[in-house]
Amino acid sequence: MKKDLERVLYSEAEIHETVKRLGVQISADYAEKNLLLVSVLKGAVVFMSDLMREITVPCAIDFMAVSSYGQEAKSSGVVRILKDLDIHLEGYDVLIVEDILDSGCTLNYIMGLLADRHPNSMRICTLFDKPEGRKAPVKADYVGMLVPNEFIVGYGLDYAEKYRNLPYIAVLKPEVYKG
Ligand code: IMP
Ligand code: MG
């Protein structure tokens, strides 16, 4: 696996510090709310499981799965629901937990869909933000770390379903996804 990596971008310790900081912020902001963390499978699952343990106020969790990339490293702009939420959103303050915000097409679609279900409120928390990649008008309310316009893997993030189990974030060598 390591031979495919160009360099480590964020270490395990750096990620942990960031997740802790986000947990503190969210716990303060949602003290009087009815928090529901909604995570988008599968990339955000590692972040979700760490973040929820840094949140000190009561919260529910739910998952949805969409596909936007397939085997490609570039966004196709097409978003398909593979698994919907189980929980009805009415009465909940929804916080969408994302691994990485790139073009914003995925979240733009999901936000529209969930807004129609009338939650109390809806915000976005993303661990990584790639602002240069943005195509849709989406802004995250909580951002962990900025990343350059390169393809990163690890800590849940994959390329063609690989590298999710790396505990750190690394830049993938371009020749790996460009063939
Ligand atoms: P967006 O719709 O372009 O914002 O794409 C968001 C989704 O694309 C993320 O949830 C990731 O699953 C995937 N993605 C975007 N950039 C990367 C990357 O650098 N590495 C791995 N997955 C990425
Ligand atoms: Mg994702």
Image (tube, rainbow, N blue to C red):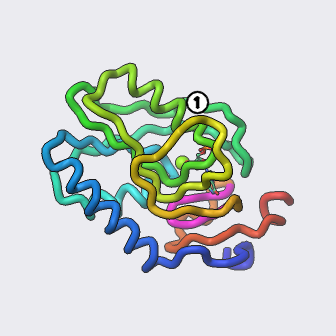
- The percent position of residue 8, horizontal first and vertical second, equals 62, 77
* Quarter the N terminus occupies: bottom right
Residue 6 horizontal side relative to residue 105, left or right = right
Chain part drawn in magenta: 151-159
Q: Is residue 49 magenta?
A: no
- The percent position of residue 71, horizontal first and vertical second, equals 72, 47
Crowding near the residue tagged with mark 1, few <14, some 14–19, many ≥20 C-alpha atoms within 10 Å: few
Q: Is 112 drawn above or below residue 20 in the view shown?
A: above
Mark count: 1
Residue 58 horizontal side relative to residue 77, left or right = left
Q: The disc labelled 1 sits on which kind of residue? A: Arg
Residue at image position (66%, 63%) is 148
Q: Is 111 drawn above or below residue 40 in the view shown?
A: above
Residue at image position (73%, 47%) is 74
Q: Is mark 1 within 8 Å of ligand 1?
A: no
Give the residue at mark 1. Answer: 80
- The percent position of residue 15, horizontal first and vertical second, equals 45, 71
- The percent position of residue 17, horizontal first and vertical second, equals 38, 74
Residue 86, located in which quarter of the rendered image?
top left
Viewer-closest of 130 and 2? 130
Dominant secondary structure of the residues highlighted in magenta in the image: loop
Secondary structure at badge 1 equals strand
Residue at image position (60%, 32%) is 79
* Quarter the C terminus occupies: bottom right
Q: Is 135 drawn above or below residue 112 in the view shown?
A: below
